[in-house]
């Protein structure tokens, strides 16, 4: 069966040079309903389990067992046919947004289309939202990066804060990791390894505080990234 022309044909589209750097004049705020407990509170619960229980659970197992369940209707999903054009172009992203908007309107006319993208595609789509806000602006689409890329961006920001602080020498001397891996942690090139080292650092800080509750101990900056 042939695909309809409005789906299979991608119209050429480009952004002018002045549109690529133009930022919105007003700030926008999106309020997301919090369905679970605060992420930092969840991390504190895992840390307490790790230092008090004899059979402490790994972080992933502890979080999976605490993940809440909801009695809701199943989400209707669909897999659309693939297109041959390159994804990281303005024309393809506008076409994809239009297709998603049409599908969402067919299934749920009252819902704003929600699109989750990789980091590079998200950057292009945000430029599209800024350029023609009347048709593809924030009132028409809700765009967000996927959980992996959000975590990578957060860990990379933490690495910039720690760069030059002597933190690499501390974790290497403590035999937590090797010098090469410690440098890769600053760039967050390996998410699982980066998350693990930050968890170890946070756990050590909690243990020191538990052993010396009345002393003011200076520790390195600790940032917890959670989903």
Image: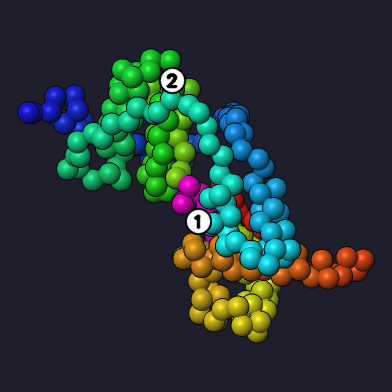
Callout 1 environment at 10 Å: few (<14), some (14 to 19), or many (20+)? many
Spot occupied by residue 6 in the image (x, y as percentages of width and height): 18, 24
Query: Where in the figure is residue 166, as x and y percent of width and height?
Result: 68, 76
- Which one is in front, 59 or 227? 59
Can the viewer see residue 133 in this picture? no
Main secondary structure found in the magenta portion: helix
Q: Nearer the viewer, residue 68 or 189?
A: 68
The residue pinned by badge 2 equals: 111
Q: Which disc is residue 152 wearing?
A: 1
Q: Residue at x 30, y 45 (%)?
A: 88
Q: Does the magenta-highlighted stretch encompass residue 152?
A: yes
Q: Is residue 194 visible?
A: yes
Of residues 103 and 206, which is closer to you in this image? 206
Mark 1 or mark 2, whichever is nearer to me:
2
Numbered tag placed on residue 92 in the rendering = none
Q: What residue sits 38% from the left and 22% below the top?
A: 135
First to last magenta residue range:
147-156
Report helix, strand or loop for mark 2: loop
Quarter of the image for the N terminus: give it: top left
The residue that appears at 69% across and 59% down in the rendered structure is: 49
Horizontal side of 216 relative to 176 (left or right) equals right
Q: How many labels sit on residues? A: 2
Give neighbour class at mark 2: few <14, some 14-19, many 20+ (Cα, 10 Å).
few
């Amino acid at each position: 069966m042939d695909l309809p022309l409005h789906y299979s044909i991608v119209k050429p589209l480009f952004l002018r040079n002045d549109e690529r750097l133009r930022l919105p004049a007003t700030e926008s705020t999106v309020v997301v309903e919090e369905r679970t407990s605060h992420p930092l509170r969840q991390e504190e619960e895992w840390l307490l389990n790790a230092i008090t229980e004899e059979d402490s659970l790994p972080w992933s197992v502890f979080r999976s067992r605490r993940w809440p369940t909801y009695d809701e209707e199943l989400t209707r999903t669909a897999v659309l046919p693939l297109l041959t054009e390159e994804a990281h172009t303005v024309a393809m992203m506008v076409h994809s947004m239009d297709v998603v908007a049409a599908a969402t309107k067919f299934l749920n006319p009252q819902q704003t289309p929600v699109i989750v993208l990789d980091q590079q595609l998200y950057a292009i789509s945000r430029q599209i939202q800024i350029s023609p806000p009347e048709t593809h602006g924030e009132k028409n689409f809700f765009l967000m990066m996927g959980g992996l890329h959000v975590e990578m961006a957060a860990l990379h920001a933490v690495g910039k804060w720690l760069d030059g602080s002597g933190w690499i020498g501390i974790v290497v001397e403590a035999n937590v990791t090797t010098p090469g891996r410690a440098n890769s942690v600053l760039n967050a090139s390996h998410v699982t390894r980066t998350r693990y080292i930050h968890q170890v650092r946070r756990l050590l800080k909690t243990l020191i505080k538990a052993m010396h509750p009345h002393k003011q101990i200076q520790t390195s900056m600790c940032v917890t990234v959670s989903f």
